[in-house]
Image (tube, rainbow, N blue to C red):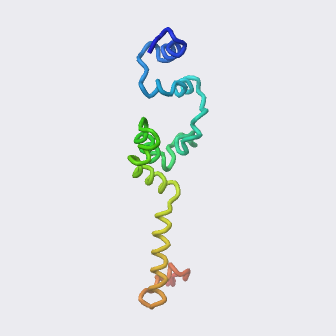
Amino acid sequence: LDPGTERGKVEVFFNKGKATPPSLRTMPFVDLQGKLGLTLDRWILAQSGEQPYRRAARCHAFEKEWIECGHGLGLTRARQECRLEYEDFYECMHRQKTHKRLYEIRAQKEKLMKEGKYTPPDHHTGKEDQRP
């Protein structure tokens, strides 16, 4: 990094003379946005945005793992090497596997009820408990 260049002067100024981490050298405006309080590219990350009461969003941890896995790999390698992290994040966001599982449980329950092998308890059918 050459402090004589315009980019070098900006990095030295904002990092107070310290060495710039490699991740910020490739994306020089990320740190600049943080210093200026701007949020121009945070919309890309669905769960990392500003949340009410400053609590982490439901799937923030999964998104963070996915992004950390793919950081610096490039799109092609990240698709292959970070597939598990992406699938976890996608499931957390959309809950497709969970809904499919609940649908199958409900279908099995209805099948057993038609066969007469299962009788749901009264509080599951909407009947009130008898009171003394």
- Count every numbered label the image shows and give the total: 0
Figure check: 26 above or below 126: above
Q: Nearer the viewer, residue 74 or 82?
A: 74
The x and y percentages for residue 68 are: 42, 39
Residue depicted at x 47% and y 83%: 120
Residue depicted at x 46% and y 74%: 104
The x and y percentages for residue 7 are: 53, 16
Figure check: 103 above or below 93: below
Q: Nearer the viewer, residue 114 or 5?
A: 5
Residue depicted at x 50% and y 79%: 123
The N terminus lies in quadrant: top left
Figure check: 131 above or below 68: below
Toward the top, the furthest residue is 4
The x and y percentages for residue 89 are: 46, 51
Q: Quadrant of residue 46?
A: top right
Residue depicted at x 49% and y 44%: 56
The x and y percentages for residue 61 are: 44, 45
Toward the front, the furthest residue is 76
Q: Nearer the viewer, residue 21 or 50?
A: 21
Figure check: 122 above or below 6: below
Q: Nearer the viewer, residue 124 or 87?
A: 87
In the image, taking residue 49 as reference, residue 72 lies left or right, namely: left
In the image, taking residue 24 as reference, residue 53 lies left or right, namely: right
